[in-house]
Amino acid sequence: MNLANKITILRICLVPIIMVFLLVNFNLPHFAFSDYQITYNQIIAAIIFIVAASTDGLDGYIARKNKIVTNLGKLLDPLADKLLVAAVLISLVQMDKLAAWMAIIIISREFAVTGLRQIALLEGSVMAASKWGKWKTAIQITMIISLLLNNFPFHFIDFPFDMISSWVAVAITVYSGIDYFVKNKHLIPVQ
């Protein structure tokens, strides 16, 4: 197994660890400063999420640079991305930090576009990531980090960045999903 695939598998392995830190109460103390509070569990989960999210582009870059792109990597990379985002979104809903309907929209779009990609593969073509898809990923990661860190550092200036980024993430997610389907409508069976 090559390095790029090992990085992708690492991202998958980090998903349950993040969920444990988010959903299991270890009775660790809270960090508090002024009226800002956060659990150490959340801080640890956020750090692990940042590490996992940062490997997203790294595995593909290493595979292309070293000419070690594999079918396993093509399969696992998008799966790892979807697992990471979906698991954390569901955890955030469980923690009452994200509205369930927002998570449902984001996760549904991921499934829909993944299905479209599978149709493209069956037709012998590959759907490349679009500009909007890349923006969607960056904004979703930003939103998740903001929610995990209880709106840090914007909490101190009373700016609801976490809420704004959630709404923007949903809007860009929907738009990028529509964009994929419009640009690839020839793949959708009409019958």
Image (tube, rainbow, N blue to C red):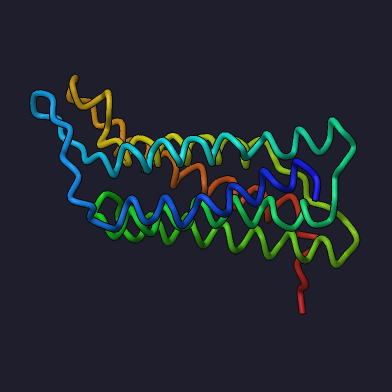
Q: How many marks?
A: 0
Frontmost residue, 72 versus 40: 40
Query: Which x, y percent locates residue 30?
Result: 16, 38
Query: Which x, y percent locates residue 40?
Result: 25, 39
Frontmost residue, 38 versus 141: 38
Q: Is residue 111 above or below residue 26?
A: below
Q: Is residue 149 above or below residue 96?
A: above
Q: Residue furthest top?
A: 157
Q: Residue furthest left?
A: 34
Frontmost residue, 57 versus 122: 57
Query: Which x, y percent locates residue 55?
Result: 61, 37
Task: State which quadrant residue 100 falls in.
Answer: bottom left
Q: Residue furthest bottom?
A: 191
Frontmost residue, 157 versus 6: 6
Task: State which quadrant residue 62 falls in.
Answer: top right
Query: Which x, y percent locates residue 97?
Result: 26, 49
Residue lying at 20% horizontally and 27% vertically, measured from the top left? 155
Q: Is residue 116 above or below residue 146?
A: below
Q: Is residue 133 above or below residue 114?
A: above
Residue lying at 24% horizontally and 32% vertically, measured from the top left? 160
Residue lying at 28% horizontally and 60% vertically, measured from the top left? 94
Residue lying at 57% horizontally and 57% vertically, measured from the top left? 110
Q: Quadrant of the C terminus?
A: bottom right
